[in-house]
Image (tube, helix red, strand yellow):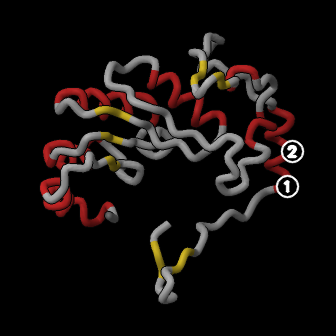
Amino acid sequence: MLPEFSQDLGAVIRSTSIPIATGERLYSRWDFRSVLSDGIAVAQPDISHAGGISESRRIAAMAEAYDVMVAPHCPLGPIALAASLQLDFAIPNFLIQEQALGIGYGDSSGLLDYLADTTPFTFRDGYIDRPTAPGLGITIDEDAVRTAAERGHRWRNPVWRNTDGSLASW
């Protein structure tokens, strides 16, 4: 359901026994207020779009008051994932962490190239250890970032279509 129609989400929730998750396109605790009271099961704030660690923590605290779990949305790179992990390890209602490293979502093949040390993102049996280095727990390779900035990029939203040719939300 598009976020513009979140006022109708309660009807969807009441019509099914399937737990509903939402939130990757909601950007503040005020955007989450109505969907939490409607009865979602999982809140999915995107730390890169929902005001960073502080606002995402506030969203998680609101979700906890409604007995709602939190599964941060994170289809981006290592800095967003490191920030999301800091949130995950600090909230009691954490469920699972989405991440795009190495799964071929878009062009994620070089995402770790921006890190001086990739070991903080070593997954074992689907789990990752809490980063313990200062800050977000990662060290950025500033030369790699400068090189990428010189190269630039021209990323655009993918255009998805339904089988009948009409535009679809990605």
The secondary structure type at the circle numbered 2 is helix
Residue 115 lies left or right of residue 30; in this view the side is right
Residue 93 location, quadrant = top left
| Above or below: residue 111 compared with residue 162 | above
Give, as a three-letter code, the residue at label 2: Thr
The residue at 81%/37% (across/down) is 113
Q: Residues within 10 Å of mark 2 (few under 14, many from 20)?
A: few
> Could you tell me which secondary element the residue under label 1 belongs to?
helix
Nearer to me, 81 or 15: 15
Q: Which image quadrant for residue 79?
A: top right
Specify the farthest residue to the bottom.
Answer: 164
Residues at marks 1 and 2, CA–CA distance in whole angstroms:
6 Å
The location of residue 155, given as percent across then percent down, is: 68, 63
Q: Nearer the viewer, residue 33 or 70?
A: 70
The residue identified by callout 1 is 151
Q: How many marks?
A: 2
Quarter in which the N terminus is drawn: bottom left
- The amino acid on which the numbered mark 1 sits, given as a three-letter code, is Arg
Residue at left offset 58%, top offset 75%: 159
> In x, y percent, where is residue 131?
61, 16
Please name the residue that numbered disc 2 is placed on: 147
**Whether label 1 touches label 2, CB < 8 Å:** yes
Q: Based on the displayed image, in which of its 4 quarters is residue 157 positioned? A: bottom right
Q: What residue is shown at x 82% (from left), y 48% (from top)? A: 148
Q: Compare residues 140 and 113 and report the one nearer the observer.
A: 113
Name which residue lies at 67% across and 57% down. Answer: 106
Q: Looking at the picture, how far across and down is residue 37, in whole percent?
A: 14, 44
Residue 67, compared with residue 160, is above or below; it is: above
Residue 166 tag number: none
Residue 133 placement, left or right of 4: right
